[in-house]
Image: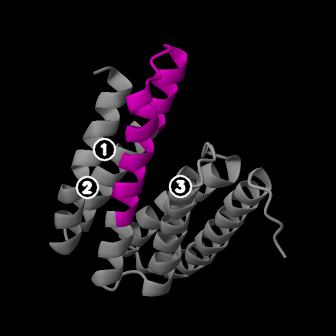
Amino acid sequence: MNIPNSLSLIRLLSAPLFCWLLISQHFNFALGLFLIASITDAADGYIAKQWQQETELGRYLDPLADKVLLMVGFITLSLIQMLPVWITLIIVSRDIVLIGGVILSKMLAKVYLVRPLIISKINTFLQMLLIMLVLLSSQFVELKPVVTMQIWLTAISTVASLWVYISRWSISNGVNLP
């Protein structure tokens, strides 16, 4: 296992600890862990590209680690009422639709490679930033308006990202959207 895949695996395995820290209301430690995990997300991609260490495992492990950590964060923060449930539903629903699209493509024997698009990278960044801001706002109440704005930005980018993926899938499969 190379360094980028090891970093992705560490990020994936940090999700249960992150959940526990949130539930236990150890928000400073949760923020620290999430920051480290976010840095490993950037580092694994950089290392893989710079040192030609991209692997088939890494193509699945990296986005899986991102999704698991983000989903754990959003679901847990909603359960402990630090985030509104509606934003979590939008984020989780987007990922369910994307996974459904990949499964549908495979069932139709069509090849559709889901490649990370710039809108998706922006969306992931905004989701990570939202989790960080929510955790920071537990210590700094004056950040609450910033969190509210970030919730809306994240919702818009999540819906936009989903629309772009659906549009591309539709075009590649000859489906005309209204």
Left or right placement of residue 12 versus residue 42 in this view: left
Q: Give above or below for 151 relative to 58.
A: below
Residue placed under numbered mark 2 in the picture: 15
Mark 3 and mark 2: Cα distance apart in space:
31 Å
Which picture quadrant has residue 164? bottom right
Looking at marks 3 and 2 on the same chain, the residue that comes earlier in the sequence is marked by 2
Q: Give above or below for 79 relative to 51.
A: below
Could you tell me residue 39's position as x and y percent?
41, 40
In magenta stretch: residue 47: yes
* Discs 3, 2 touching: Cβ within 8 Å: no
**Protein image colouring:** one colour
Q: Secondary structure at mark 3?
A: helix
Single out the residue that lies furthest toward the top: 51
Q: Amino acid at mark 3?
A: Met
In magenta stretch: residue 107: no
Q: Amino acid at mark 1?
A: Arg
What residue is at 35 percent from the left and 56 percent from the top?
68
Q: Which residues are magenta?
A: 42-71
Question: For the residue carrying disc 1, how many other residues have a C-alpha within 10 Å: few (<14), some (14-19), or many (20+)?
Answer: many
Residue placed under numbered mark 3 in the picture: 107
Q: Which mark is residue 11?
A: 1
Left or right placement of residue 57 versus residue 89 in this view: left
* Discs 2, 1 touching: Cβ within 8 Å: yes
Out of 136 and 66, give the one closest to the viewer.
66
Judge whether residue 84 can be spotted in this image.
no
Front of the two marks 3 and 1: 3
What residue is at 84 percent from the left and 76 percent from the top?
178
Could you tell me residue 99's position as x and y percent?
49, 59
Out of 108 and 13, give the one closest to the viewer.
108
